[in-house]
Image (cartoon, helix red, strand yellow):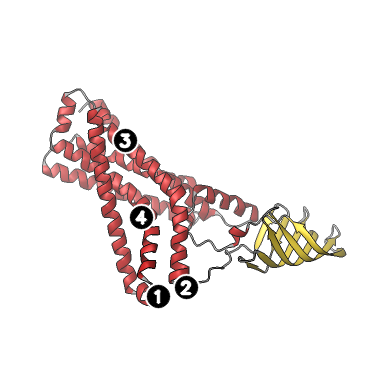
């Protein structure tokens, strides 16, 4: 048990060190890039820039976690091999699986961290980051309406509004069209404005004109009402412009967007791709950490060590290349979302398990 925590401690130490280095480099490159045009153009206050980069941290950490897991596993196993500690463990009767178990547990722990950051921290901090960037730094409008929010479809009912004021929660120019099986209108509501009522979670229409139609679609008769409550399937918070990118949404938000988009007839392919890519990327720290296990059992010569590290980095880089390439093809409709998102994990996991099985079988 002491050896287990000894190896795990080294793995975590190198993970933290690699994370700090990667995040620092990401921040440095982004800041240098912004100094060319962005900062001279908007001349932001120092405090706003600091807030922006603080809220940017979860995104950077999530991107760096697989890199840190890969390099930490390789460095840990190579250094244990170079100092003959693995030789001592093997002499004590420990096989490859027992020696590499701390790395495996550490990789699974990083997956838990990735899930926590990606599902709970990133969605909230990314929203604040974009608010600081687009509203406070770039001085954009705070009350922009979400793209495509003016039309909503719920089964056989269409909802439309001309404009919306997020401060007063009032819609203007509201239309509700109920259609039949042949998509011809059965009933139509036209209201001058609609006010959201949070206590009953519905909208109160004012100055309402109701039109009734015959089965063939011709107008039958009309009536008017001063006020009329209607359950429009639109929440005020969803009407505001979504400043976050799809990969910054939580899995629950992505699934909700997919469900509502499918009901409204909106193209949801990119959201489906991002959902499965997000889930697959949660598993990436565990998958890539397995690459380092094989390099603890090789020759302790410097040349072999260098080859091992370079091969591990090459395999890890191929993972990101393959994942991004498959993601781009899936968004174009060339590949289905699920195979495109998960194929990199499956291929790399199979590669690592085959190597571990060979090591175990040979009892190196």
The mark that comes first in sequence, 4 or 1, is: 1
Residue under the point 21% across and 45% down: 309
Q: Are marks 4 and 1 in contact (CB under 8 Å)?
A: no
Relative side of 200 to 254, left or right = right
Q: Is residue 264 visible?
A: yes
Q: Nearer the viewer, mark 2 or mark 3?
A: 2
Residue annotated with mark 3: 104
Q: Nearer the viewer, residue 275 or 105?
A: 105
At x 17% / y 36%, what residue is drawn? 80
Q: Which residue is mark 2?
A: 139
The quarter of the displayed image where residue 192 is located: bottom right
Image position of 106 (left or right of 271):
left
Could you tell me how far apart the alpha carbons at marks 3 and 4 are, in whole angstroms?
Answer: 23 Å
The answer to the question of whether label 1 and label 2 lie on touching residues, with beta carbons closer than 8 A, is: yes
Label 2 and label 3: CA atoms lie apart by 47 Å
Q: Are marks 3 and 4 in contact (CB under 8 Å)?
A: no
Residue wearing tag 4: 60
Query: On the image, which quarter does residue 76 sit in?
Result: top left
* 91 is higher (above) or lower (below) than 25: above
Q: Position of residue 77 (x, y in %)?
A: 21, 38
Q: CA distance from mark 1 to mark 3?
A: 47 Å
- Position of the C terminus by quadrant: top left
Mark 3: few, some, or many residues within 10 Å (few <14, many ≥20)? many
The furthest residue to the bottom: 41
**Label 1: element kind:** helix
Residue, disc 1: 42
Residue 259 shown left or right of residue 138 in the figure:
right
Question: Mark 4 and mark 1: span between their CA atoms?
Answer: 23 Å
């Amino acid at each position: 048990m002491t050896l287990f925590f000894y190896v795990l401690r080294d793995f975590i130490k190198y993970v933290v060190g690699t994370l700090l280095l990667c995040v620092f480099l990401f921040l440095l490159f982004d800041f240098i890039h912004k100094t060319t045009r962005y900062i001279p153009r908007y001349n932001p206050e120092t405090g706003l820039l600091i807030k922006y980069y603080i809220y940017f941290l979860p995104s950077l950490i999530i991107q760096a976690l697989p890199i840190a897991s890969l390099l930490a596993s390789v460095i840990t196993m190579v250094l244990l091999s170079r100092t003959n500690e693995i030789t001592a463990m093997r002499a004590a009767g420990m096989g490859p699986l027992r020696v590499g178990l701390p790395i495996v547990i550490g990789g699974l722990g990083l997956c838990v961290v990735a899930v926590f950051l990606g599902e709970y921290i990133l969605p909230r901090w990314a929203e604040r980051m974009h608010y600081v960037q687009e509203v406070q730094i770039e001085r954009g409008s705070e009350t922009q309406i979400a793209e495509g929010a003016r039309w909503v479809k719920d089964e056989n009912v269409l909802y439309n509004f001309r404009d919306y004021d997020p401060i007063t929660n009032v819609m203007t120019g509201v239309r509700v069209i109920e259609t039949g099986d042949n998509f011809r209108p059965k009933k139509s509501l036209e209201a001058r404005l609609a006010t959201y009522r949070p206590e009953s979670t519905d909208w109160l229409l004012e100055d309402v004109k109701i039109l009734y139609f015959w089965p063939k679609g011709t107008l039958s008769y009309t009536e008017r009402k001063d006020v009329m409550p209607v359950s429009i399937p639109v929440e005020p918070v969803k009407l505001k412009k979504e400043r976050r990118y799809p990969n910054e949404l939580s899995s629950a938000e992505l699934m909700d967007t997919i469900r509502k988009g499918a009901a409204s007839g909106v193209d949801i392919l990119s959201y489906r791709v991002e959902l499965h890519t997000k889930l697959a990327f949660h598993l990436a720290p565990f998958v890539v950490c397995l690459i380092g296990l094989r390099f603890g059992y090789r020759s302790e010569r410097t040349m072999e060590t260098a080859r091992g590290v370079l091969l591990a980095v090459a395999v890890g880089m191929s993972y990101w290349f393959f994942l991004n390439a498959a993601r781009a093809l899936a968004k174009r409709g060339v590949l289905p979302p699920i195979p495109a998102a998960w194929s990199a994990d499956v291929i790399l996991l199979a590669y690592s398990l085959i190597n571990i099985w060979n090591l175990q079988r040979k009892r190196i």
